[in-house]
Amino acid sequence: MQLRIVVLPGDGVGPEVTEQAVRVLREVAGIHGHNFHFEEHVVGGGAINLNGLPLPTTTLDACLAADAVLLGAIGSPEFDHLPADRRPEAGLLMLRRKLGGFANLRPIISYPALIDASPLRSEIVKGANILFVRELLGGLYFGEPRGILSSNGSSAAFNTMRYSVSEIERVARVAFEAAMKRKRKVTSVDKANVLETSQLWRQTVTRIAADYPEVELDHLYVDAAAMHIITNPRRFDVILTENLFGDILSDEAAVIAGSLGMLASGTIGGAIDLYEPVHGSAPDIAGRGIANPLGAIASAAMMLRYTARLADEADDIEAAIDNVLDAGYRTRDIATGDNRRVISTSEMGGLVCDTVAQVADIRHAYHAV
């Protein structure tokens, strides 16, 4: 397998966690004889410091020529004084739009070893496994017109939530196709009792569901969904929702996994797929070697699964994460109680690398028998 990967370490802890994800990918390539070519570029705050732009043309061109993009994190308070279109986050939104990925996949898994890391009771989160399918290129984040108006010493701001039938159809099909490989249930989240966009969303998703008779569909208002995610997360399989709701709900669901640092994501459907951990840049802990790289490493596994179609290799990485956690190793964000195996970012990456090799050996031996 030949795979050209553009790496965008980004800001804060992004370079630290991305380094470990690349380390694991190199291990996988070495084990299986793949050729993964890595090309690193600047984005976000680092790019602003170099040339004043959060997404330089050279970075974007490299991403558009790649097979996949692996991103660390974007954002830093030192740039909050800049106009909105010059801040690091503007670079991320532009990158998403240019790459064209419209479906953001965010798995939320309750790892048995991390039950105590969740603030929720163990009987609530045990066995929870949710896949969020979030529409990523529409809604309030991209709708026009938008802006801030000032008149006579007073200001008002406005954003536009807008969705077309085609935008809803294409992301709905991603959700139903994913459900066919899971427990065959889709929960569509909207606010159809208030918003016209949600009324169109519900009508369209219901129509698309007819093409997937084996998948059970139910609808929830976003406020009810927020409650059920916390009180009964096991009722969900695939959650399909629009951009803003998906952003908020998937972050809320991080309590199921115990930490945002555990969460991976992949953005698919466009010309180039984009993979990144869900957590932010966390500038308060940057450079201290304590960030959790497992979300970034799991994002690398998603890259192998969805872009490279290397399901076995993705399984090996995910199994390695499970095994390392089962052995009691933790970064600071997921360490609880008397757990004494608190390790650094680099040590966690190294353990996953070592375990990936062990898992691959076991799988090869099993298939040989």
Image (cartoon, rainbow, N blue to C red):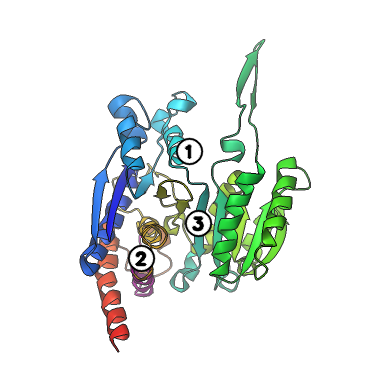
Indicate the position of residue 141 as horizontal and vertical percent values.
Answer: 57, 37
Q: Residues within 10 Å of mark 2 (few under 14, many from 20)?
A: some
Identified by mark 1, the residue type is Arg
Secondary structure at badge 2 equals loop
Secondary structure at badge 1 equals helix
Q: Quadrant of the N terminus?
A: bottom left
Query: Which residue ends up furthest to the bottom in the rendered image?
Result: 369
Q: Is residue 82 visible?
A: yes
Spatial CA span between label 2 and label 1? 26 Å
* For residue 152, above or below residue 275: above
Indicate the position of residue 60 as horizontal and vertical percent values.
Answer: 35, 36
Identified by mark 3, the residue type is Arg
Q: Residue at x 56, y 63 (%)?
A: 177
Stretch of the chain drawn in magenta: 313-331
Label 3 sits on residue:
106
Identified by mark 2, the residue type is Leu
Spatial CA span between label 3 and label 2? 19 Å
Q: Residues within 10 Å of mark 3 (few under 14, many from 20)?
A: many
Precedes in sequence: disc 3 or disc 1: 1
Q: Residue at x 55, y 57 (%)?
A: 174
Precedes in sequence: disc 3 or disc 2: 3
Indicate the position of residue 275 as horizontal and vertical percent values.
Answer: 40, 51
Label 1 sits on residue:
97
Q: Residue at x 28, y 75 (%)?
A: 360
Label 2 sits on residue:
310
Closer to the camera, 247 or 136? 136
